[in-house]
Amino acid sequence: MKVAILTIGCKLNQYESEYIVESFSKAGYGIVDFKEEADIYIINTCTVTSQADSKSRQAIRQAKRRNPKSIVVAVGCYAELKKDELKNIGADIVVGNVEKVFLVDIVKDYLIKGDLEDTRNISREVFYPMPVEDFKDYARAFVKVQDGCDSECSYCIVWKARGKPRSAEIDFVVEEVKRLVDRGFEEIVLTGVNLGSYGKDLGVSLVDLLKRLVKIDSLKKIRLSSIEPTEWSDELIDFVIHEKIAKHFHIPLQSGSDRILEIMNRKYKRKFFENIVLKLKEKIPIVGIGVDVIVGFPTETERDFLETYETIDQLPIYYMHIFTYSDRPGTLASILNPKVPPSVKRERYEALRKLRNEKMDRFISSFLGKKIYGVVEGRTIDGNRYTRALSENYIPILVEGDYSFLRCKVKIFQATGKNGLNLVGKLDQV
Ligand code: SF4
């Protein structure tokens, strides 16, 4: 039987899709592209924005149209929260996040019985490891070490879909990373819904995990996915100076207005955020810091927005993901008024977009003539003139020459020029 999968949403979903693909492939199913005719279509849904909802619904309809006899499976955050809605538009199986680990059996059961037994007795409080054997299309391997969140941000629905925070045992993660390093990956990305809260349920911390991981020979760089501001302890700030930690940190700001932060139920103030960024910059001059920011949150005034703009403008921030606020039914923010008119949201988005491009350009230019670590992604462009790499502080590098044979390896590059928002460089040593 042929299985096709489509992933919507975050890096964690992408990782979990890799796991799903591998588990179906090991069970003897053929994997085909989502655009092809398949017997089973899996849509790994997302519900972080209304756009993500709509993409997920669209994919379910598309799958049923492509092969009306197929079994359409909706999994993930949207499926977790809106089971009936997705069944009504054509999904045959609708299961949440923890069921991803058991998906092959769930589908097999469905094929035999033509119905789905209630899977809700699968515990939502246990961390189910999802080891991925090989990341064939990736130059970096991802390891999911944490799931769930209890921060209850007022605009967010993810914590409802992902359940309580829970973590993988340190020994499991160490073994997993060793296995991936043995397969040739020199850079590992640690991921989770709220990575900074890693280990709280186990009585350990993210630093405890990192201390073990940096001892692994042949592992050159560990990249951390998003870390919430409140999770940046002094101990973590001091530890990330370590040469094996990639100097790229994503820290969601969301707003620079203390008033808005409070109604977002974000448990820090602008000053607190500024201190983290400044400390990191002072200790790690090459650090590449990215932020998330939401424009047009209900009640956001011009003054609130200016505070956000100034915060980002004044801080050594490299890039930002800008989200235009939209109501998520079921969240506290969705019942807050007054709403910001769409035209004002657009203006604020545009202002931040311009600022982002200026800041990125300045940050990238500051590395001209310098040497920098990066992982070779392996894809060549412009014939074989350049090979893509990604610097440890998250700058795309176009490396002169064909170095696709060095895919997954961490090397030093000499930045010689710039091409748009890429550095152009030479390999310093093979
Ligand atoms: S920290 Fe806030 S925004 Fe992030 S997943 Fe948790 S509740 Fe959602």
Image (cartoon, rainbow, N blue to C red):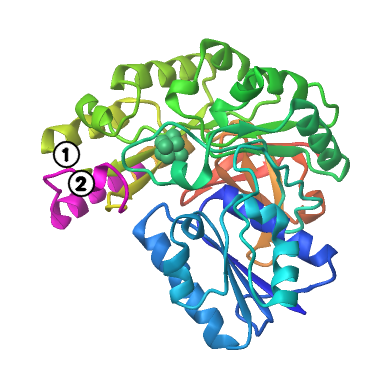
Give the magenta-colored segment's residue range. Answer: 329-356
The disc at residue 300 is 1
Residue 197 in the image: above or below residue 53:
above
Write down which quadrant ligand 1 falls in: top left
Residue 237 placed where, x, y %?
54, 16
Residue type of the residue flagged with mark 1: Glu
Q: Quadrant of residue 181?
A: top right
Q: Horizontally, is 171 left or right of 44 in the view?
A: right
Please, what secondary structure does the residue beneath circle 1 have? Answer: loop
Please, what secondary structure does the residue beneath circle 2 have? Answer: helix
Between residues 417 and 351, which one lies in front from this camera angle?
A: 351
Q: Is residue 387 something one can see in this rendering?
A: no
Of callouts 1 and 2, the N-terminal one: 1
Q: Horizontally, is 416 left or right of 222 in the view?
A: left
Residue 408 placed where, x, y %?
76, 46
Residue type of the residue flagged with mark 2: Ile
Q: Residue at x 55, y 41 (%)?
A: 395
Label 1 vs label 2, nearer the camera: 2
Residue at the limit of the structure toward the right, as seen here: 182
Does mark 2's beta carbon lie closer than 8 Å to ligand 1?
Answer: no
- Quarter of the picture containing the C terminus is top right
Helix, strand or loop for the magenta stretch, by majority: helix
Q: Residue at x 35, y 23 (%)?
A: 267
Q: Which residue is mark 2?
A: 335
Q: Residue at x 20, y 27 (%)?
A: 259
The verdict on residue 348 being magenta is: yes
Residue 52 in the image: above or below residue 40:
above
